[in-house]
Every structure is written in C-alpha cells, then in structure tokens.
Image: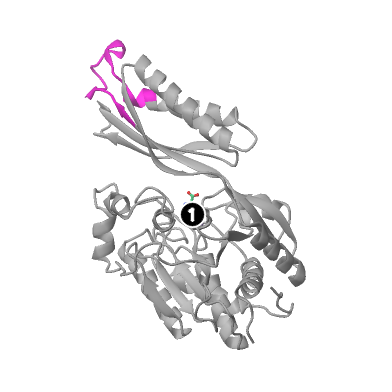
C-alpha cells in the first residue's frame, strides 16, 4: 500500500462546525448532551447525520439493529469497504465528543476526499453504531456485539430500560429498524477515532494516541433481597438489610480492584432501591458492578473473587444474592498493520504520538472479532468524559481526523 502525500489534511473548521451542530441535538442541562439511544433526540441526531451523508453523496444502508452505514463507492466493486465511524448516542449526562467525534470525523474524511477529488479502490463506509453506551439498555456496544456474532438479535431486542421498555419496541417506535441482516456486511478494515476519555495523552502532551489494545470488561448485575421494614421501629438485630449488604459489597469491589493494581478498575455507576422510600428498609437492591483490566487473568480473577465475596457478605446478613453477567468482552489486541499505519501517519503529519491502551470500551472491540481493526485517539481536557463538561480543542479534533484520513487512504488504496 502506498501512503498518501503528507500535505493532505481534512477541513478542521468544517469538522468543528459539524460537532457543534450535532451538539445542539439532545442538549444536556450543563453544556453537554443527553441523546440516549432510541430516544426522540437520538432519532433527530440520526436524521441530521443522514442528511449530511446524503449531501456528501453517500448511500445509506441500515441493519436490523438500526446501525447506519453510509457508503462512498470505490473503483473496484468487488473490494470490501474500509469502515470508519463510532456512535452518536450519549450518556444521560454525556459530553459533546464521546463517539460523535468518530462518526463526524469519518464523514469529514469523506467530505475531504470529495473536495480533493480522490478516488479509492475500496469503498469507504461511515458508521453510526446503535447503543454503544449501554446506558439505557445494557450491555454497552450492543449493536456491534450483534454484528460480530457475540450477541443475538433476539437477546438485543429483549433488553429493557428502567421503565421496562424493550430495545426492539423502541427501535421500531423511532422508525429505525433497517432491512439489512446484522453482520452480513464484510469489512476490509475498521478504524475508529475517539477521544481518550482518560488523562494520559494530555498529561504526556501527545496529540495522537496510537491505540494498540483495549482493556476487557465484565458488567455484573447484582440483585440483593432483604426484607422491607420500618426504619424507625425495626430493631437493628431484626433487620434483613440489603442496603447494608450493598455498601459492604461496594467496599469489597474497591478493595479487589486496588489489590489488582496496576491495570485494574472496579466500581458501580447504577443502583436501584425498592421501594426507595426514606423510611422503608429496601426489600430489593439492584446494581451493576463494572470491572476492567487489560490482563485477562486479572479480569477473570476479579470476577471470581467478587462473585464469591458478594455471596458471603449477603449470606452473613441473611440477604438473598443473585449475580448475572450483563456485559462482557475480553481484552482486545488491535491489528498490528493498521496500528503501524496510524503511527506512521502521525509521524508523516508531524503530530506527537504515543502508544496507548484504551480504558473505555468501544465498538472497535467487537469489530476486531470480524475484521482487521484499530483506533486513533485524541486527548480530552483533564481526562474527563461521561460528564457534560467533557472538552477537547479544535486542534486536537483536527489532528486525529488528519491521521484518520491518511490511515483510510492508505488502507482503501488511492486510485487516482
Ligand atoms: O463503557 C464504556 O467503556 C463505553 O463508554 N461504553
Ligand atoms: Mn464512546
Ligand atoms: Mn461513552
């Protein structure tokens, strides 16, 4: 493959304008976004992205999980496409760039190829994966998981949000059930550009993260069954206290993660109490433990210890305990050829760079199961993400998109 000349750059102002335009869709309450998957705001964002793709001359395909694939044709109809993209859905208190940067930078790469009159042998496809976040419907990376064959369509359609609404019904409600079989598409390669969502690149003053790996993950949903009782008149020795069991399990998860340093994290982001009344001891407590590590043995060892010790903690308090894995993928090693293409593109373009392991999960983690895959990262301010204050600079955004342009052109092969 011949690398493109080093003077090819994307249009950074146009990319930034598109990011700011998309940020107006599903605004949060503190400057970020609340564009959760399969909500009306998600549908609005999809329509905006669709209009931009059509304006760029792309042909849109949609699969049965609602994932959007916008294709720029290549010169060789038999060549498998090079896929780029990420996700447009956000956390409830999400930032303006998580996922969105990858989708709109993929679009910017196509827009720039149009401006430069570049044709490639392989087609280029810009992707918006449905429900990457897993905030409303667990697990995260749901559509890409079905695409990679790790999850079934029926399992995905049956996933329910906290109001009991199903993924399948909500996808139908917003009118984004596509006709393509999920996973029928074959990829020549997949390259995802994403903000780091951590503090390393900014601290090391590097413009580009050359992502070599992504850490693995378990999401363990714990259901604790206590006994609803009066918080005032129930003596301490007669309580079956699911809330106390939860607190002790949280403390244990923290301890297990700290005992697996370096390279392990563990915590809880979502809890529900039933009946969730100030003066009723909870009869049921449900929460999801999120543990991650780039080391397979550590990841699985933490899961085993947490499941054993959670059961012991609950039993000691007479509290019922059941645990269900509701999300998982093993640590991922990205494709070495694509990784070195990203690195040499950064060097050719004069951008500082370093190897990095992704702390967050991405659709690339599932794409790597079915095609040569890699990622590119840019720094984010203070390493903050999954927070409405998430921030990047236009320069950071453009640098990564330039690298994406070069990596895509080298992989899709310039045809004149
Ligand atoms: O959970 C994750 O790592 C991703 O942000 N969905
Ligand atoms: Mn993301
Ligand atoms: Mn995210």
Helix, strand or loop status at disc 1: helix
Residue at image point 44% right, 54% down: 141
The quadrant in which residue 403 appears is bottom right
- Residue lying at the far top in this picture: please name it: 237
Q: For residue 29, what is the image quadrant?
A: bottom left
Out of 154 and 348, give the one closest to the viewer. 154
Position of residue 176 measured from the top left corner of the image (x, y, whole percent):
30, 68
Above or below residue 85? Residue 409 is below
Lateral position of residue 244 relative to residue 250, left or right: left
* Foreground pick, 239 / 359: 359
Q: Is mark 1 within 8 Å of ligand 1?
A: no
Residue 156: give x, y in percent of width and height: 32, 52
Figure check: 196 above or below 18? above
Residue 162 location (% of width, % of height)? 29, 46
| Residue 411 placement: quadrant | bottom right
Residue 279 in view of the camera: no
Q: Which segment did they paint magenta? A: 223-245
Q: Is residue 416 above or below residue 17?
A: below
Image quarter (top left, top right, bottom left or bottom right) of the C terminus: bottom right
Q: Is residue 85 visible?
A: yes
Residue found farthest to the front: 78
Q: Residue 374: give x, y in percent of width and height.
A: 60, 59
* Residue highlighted by disc 1: 366
Say whether residue 160 is left or right of residue 335: left
Q: Quadrant of the N terminus?
A: bottom right
Check if residue 125 falls in the magenta segment. no
Q: Residues within 10 Å of mark 1 (few under 14, many from 20)?
A: many
């Amino acid at each position: 493959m011949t690398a493109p000349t080093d003077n090819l750059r994307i249009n950074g102002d146009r990319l930034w304008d598109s990011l700011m335009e998309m940020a107006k869709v599903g605004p949060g309450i503190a400057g970020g976004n609340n564009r959760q998957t399969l909500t009306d705001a998600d549908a609005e964002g999809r329509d905006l992205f669709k209009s931009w793709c059509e304006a760029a001359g792309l042909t849109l395909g949609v699969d049965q999980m609602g994932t959007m694939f916008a294709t720029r044709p290549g010169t060789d109809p038999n060549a498998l496409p090079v896929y780029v993209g990420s996700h447009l859905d956000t956390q409830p208190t999400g930032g303006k760039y998580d996922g969105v940067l990858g989708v709109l930078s993929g679009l910017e790469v196509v827009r720039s190829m149009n401006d430069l009159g570049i044709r490639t042998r392989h087609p280029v496809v810009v992707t918006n994966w449905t429900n990457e976040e897993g905030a409303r419907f667990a697990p995260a990376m749901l559509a890409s998981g079905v695409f990679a064959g790790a999850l079934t369509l029926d399992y995905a359609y049956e996933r329910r949000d906290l109001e009991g609404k199903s993924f399948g019904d909500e996808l139908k409600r917003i009118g984004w059930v596509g006709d393509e079989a999920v996973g029928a598409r074959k990829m020549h390669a997949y390259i995802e550009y994403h903000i780091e969502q951590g503090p390393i690149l900014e601290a090391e003053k590097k413009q580009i993260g050359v992502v070599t790996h992504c850490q693995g993950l378990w999401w363990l949903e714990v259901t604790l069954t206590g006994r609803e009782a009066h918080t005032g008149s129930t003596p301490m020795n007669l309580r079956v206290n699911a809330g106390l069991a939860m607190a002790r399990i949280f403390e244990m998860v923290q301890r297990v993660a700290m005992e697996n340093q370096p390279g392990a994290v563990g915590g809880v982001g979502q809890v529900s109490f039933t009946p969730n009344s100030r003066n009723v001891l909870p009869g049921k407590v449900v929460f999801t433990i999120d543990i991650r590590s780039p080391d397979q043995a550590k990841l699985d060892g933490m899961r085993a210890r947490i499941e054993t010790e959670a059961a012991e903690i609950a039993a000691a308090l007479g509290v019922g305990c059941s645990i269900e894995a509701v999300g998982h993928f093993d640590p991922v090693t990205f494709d070495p050829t694509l990784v070195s293409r990203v690195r040499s593109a950064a060097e050719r373009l004069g951008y500082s760079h370093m190897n990095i392991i992704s702390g967050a999960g991405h659709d690339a983690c599932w794409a790597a199961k079915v095609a040569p895959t890699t990622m590119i990262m840019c720094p984010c301010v203070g390493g903050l993400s999954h927070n409405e204050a998430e921030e990047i600079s236009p320069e950071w955004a453009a640098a990564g998109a330039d690298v994406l342009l070069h990596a895509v052109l080298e992989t899709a092969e310039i045809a004149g």
